[in-house]
Image (spheres, grey):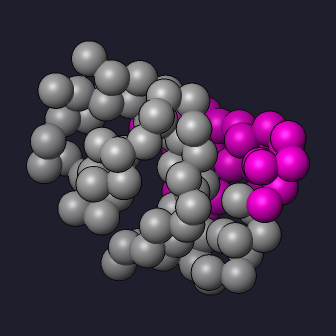
Amino acid sequence: MEWRASHILVKNRSLAEELFKKIQKGARFEQLAKEYSTCPSKSKGGDLGWFGTGQMVKPFEEAVKKMGRGRASKPVSTQFGYHIIKKTGER
């Protein structure tokens, strides 16, 4: 199984929660990624491409597995910071 996802990575939880609320109210995920994410993927609207089992840190991968396609996650904490993840594909 492979998944495709985009994410917004930030250092603090309160900012992640604020961005998640903006997404819920209709803000464009890709635009927020370009504006706020600290990951180099921000230039692509947060797109991480396709990845398989074991390619992402465990909390990130577990969140993606449980998500519906096109949905954004509540903030997910990893050693890199707080991610808001949008699942864009599964194959």
Vertical order, 26 against 63 (above or below): above
- Figure disc tally: 0
Q: Nearer the viewer, residue 43 or 6?
A: 6
Q: Residue at x 65, y 37 (%)?
A: 45
- Residue 40 visible, this orientation: no
Residue 14, magenta (yes or no): no
Figure quadrant of residue 90? top left
Q: Could you tell me which quadrant the N terminus lies in?
A: top left
- Residue 80 visible, this orientation: yes
Q: Nearer the viewer, residue 17 or 31?
A: 17
Q: Nearer the viewer, residue 46 or 73?
A: 73
Q: Residue at x 46, y 67 (%)?
A: 76
Report x, y in % for residue 42. Answer: 62, 46
| Numbered range of the magenta stretch | 21-50
Task: Left or right? Give the position of 30 relative to 59.
Answer: right
Task: Left or right? Give the position of 34 relative to 57.
Answer: right
Report x, y in % for residue 37. Answer: 64, 58
Task: Left or right? Give the position of 56 relative to 25.
Answer: left
Residue 34, magenta (yes or no): yes
Report x, y in % for residue 21. Answer: 78, 60
Vertical order, 4 against 32 (above or below): above
Q: Could you tell me which quadrant the C terminus lies in?
A: top left
Q: Residue at x 35, y 78 (%)?
A: 79
Report x, y in % for residue 14. Answer: 71, 82
Task: Left or right? Give the position of 5 relative to 73.
Answer: left
Figure quadrant of residue 52? top left
